[in-house]
Amino acid sequence: MFNTSTQCKNWMFENEVDINNCRTNVNANFISSRRKLLGEEIQNVDFLTSSEEKQLLLHYENTLKVFCQKFQPPMPRCVTGTALHYLKRFYVNNSVMEYPPKEILITCVYLACKVEEFNVSMNQFISNLNGDKERAAAIILNNELLLMQQLDYQLTIFNPFRPLEGLLIDMKTRFAGLREPEKLRPGIDEFLESVYFTEAVLIYSPSQIALAAIIYSASNAKENVDHYITDILFGKDSNLLGNLIKAVKEIRIMVRNVQMPHRDTVKLLENKLQLCCNPDNNSSSAAFKKRMKQSFEDEEMYEDGQYAKSSEQS
């Protein structure tokens, strides 16, 4: 049940202001820690603002969605929804300057495949990626534990797809005012695709989002579902109905206001990110490669028993 889940208890916010405040604090903390650590040599670095981070994150959410759409074998939409949840959660508490979004988003999809029991091997998964497959596998495995830690190992996600199916079945059974509820699906799918580019999934319950999608599609199809919602679904519970109407309106406004950043804007922000990111977590940087090399050398020394010998001598 969603109401007793870790998603409801630990990962839901009151509103967009709360989420923006979290991201503003994360941005400020990253900049402060980098300046404190590196002193004068980083004083002139132009860091990303929290609003710029938000634009980049929106771009990478779309990148994740496109990757999942092209994935072979075809990926269930629940995997995409879960992966997008993970990405949003991760960057509520971390800056895109701390961990590269390109690497984290692929790890989100890989972990979502496991959690949603979409069984693909690592070789199958990386065959969908361009570039160095071996390097991609290493990046995913290197980030997987980090991702789970940042999610507090709370990996079960309630997406709006199941409550949506329940509502459509209920409409077919109890609402004669709409002869073919299935004709609403194209509009519903369009709405749900857009809703993941908003903060709605971190604020509203899956059933509220599902109902908002139905109302949106019905409105576009010139169908009236008011009787189903006010009389059949909620009956005489005016308080619950009032809260729902408010939530649905807010969700629809969020979806209507989605604006993807322009390609030129994304390019400028990515160039800026390269100059202000933490090189220790960037797999393309010399600092990261040096750290990974040291890690592999340490493992080899353990395997060869060299650490044991050195500790005996000391």
Image (cartoon, rainbow, N blue to C red):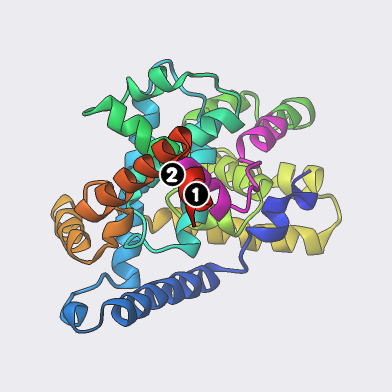
Q: Is residue 37 left or right of residue 152?
A: left
Instruction: Identify the residue position indicated by label 1 in the image.
Output: 146
Question: Could you tell me residue 124's position as x and y percent?
Answer: 40, 17
Report the amino acid beneath label 1: Leu
Magenta stretch bounds: 144-168
162 falls in the magenta region: yes
Q: Secondary structure at mark 1?
A: helix
Label 1 and label 2: CA atoms lie apart by 5 Å
Instruction: Identify the residue position indicated by label 2 in the image.
Output: 143
Going 61% across and 40% down the picture, which residue do you hit? 159
Report the amino acid beneath label 2: Asn
Q: Circles 1 and 2: CB distance less than 8 Å?
A: yes
131 falls in the magenta region: no
Q: Is residue 122 left or right of residue 174?
A: left
Vertical relation: 126 (above or below) 155? above
The front one of 308 and 32 is: 308
Going 17% across and 58% down the picture, which residue do you hit? 265
Q: Secondary structure at mark 2?
A: helix
Going 38% across and 45% down the picture, which residue do you hit? 295
Neighbor class of circle 2 (other Cα within 10 Å; few <14, some 14-19, many 20+) is some
Q: Is residue 240 left or right of residue 30?
A: right
Main SS, magenta residues: helix
Question: Could you tell me residue 195's position as x and y percent?
Answer: 48, 48
